[in-house]
Image (cartoon, helix red, strand yellow):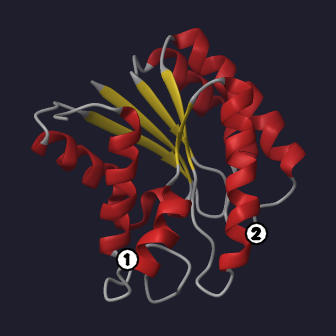
Amino acid sequence: MRTLFIGNSHTYFNDMPAIFKNLCKEQGVDMQVAMLTKGGMGLDYHAENEQTRFNILYGDYDFVILQHVAHPMGEYDVMEAAADKIVSWIREAGAVPCYYMTWTEEDNESFQAEMAARYRKLARKHECLLAPVGEKWWEEIHRNPSVDLYDEDRRHASVAGSIFAAQVILDTLGIGKA
């Protein structure tokens, strides 16, 4: 199987796609991963990048994971227009799109509901999967505060946070051992 991750530092921090690949291997799934990422960039950047279109259409991916800029998230209309374009390429290629909902900064938990609402709205519109990492992130922080999911910058994931995100994505895709 093949998965393409599209996003920014919330995707590439700690090489989360490689962590995802290793989790797949532990579940008996042979997964190849690739990523198109640029720090601080959202889906709008990727929608205008010819490399994105080419990789989606010719990469023979089973899944394409989409992550938008998180801090700040920007205007919903910009995110939606870019997602419309990228998801159309994913559908044309016959792959399964999955949104990767990120988390808010440590001192901004109250914005998580808005972030989640935007991702859920797009997932409904495009009838695709949604990995609710951000929502589950905060649930985990409240349930198990001894595990620090944040990197020292308090915005990105620690190694534990990247493992957590990769596991939520794997669970969302429904592949591997049940």
Front-most of 72 and 120?
Answer: 120
Farthest front residue? 143
* Kind of residue at badge 1: Ser
Left or right: where 121 falls relative to 132 = right
Q: Earlier in the sequence, mark 2 or mark 1?
A: 2
Q: Residue at x 53, y 16 (%)?
A: 57
Tell me the quarter of the image containing the C terminus: top left
Q: Residue at x 50, y 11 (%)?
A: 94
Relative to 153, does residue 133 appear above or below in the rendering? above
Left or right: where 42 falls relative to 158 = right
Front-most of 7 and 52?
Answer: 7
Relative to 98, does residue 164 appear above or below in the rendering? below
Tell me the quarter of the image containing the N terminus: top left
Q: Residues within 10 Å of mark 1 (few under 14, many from 20)?
A: some
Residue 142 in percent (x, y) is at: 46, 80
Q: Residues within 10 Å of mark 2 (few under 14, many from 20)?
A: few
Disc 1 element: loop
Residue 31 in percent (x, y) is at: 23, 33
Residue 80 in percent (x, y) is at: 80, 38
Q: Residue at x 43, y 82 (%)?
A: 151
Q: Residue at x 57, y 20 (%)?
A: 90
* Kind of residue at badge 2: Pro
Image quadrant where residue 114 sits: bottom right
Q: Label for residue 158?
A: 1
Q: Which residue is mark 2?
A: 72
Disc 2 element: loop
Q: CA distance from mark 2 to mark 1?
A: 19 Å
Residue 49 visible in the current orientation: no
> Looking at the image, how many numbered discs can be counted on the residues?
2
Left or right: where 34 falls relative to 93 = left
Front-most of 126 and 46?
Answer: 126
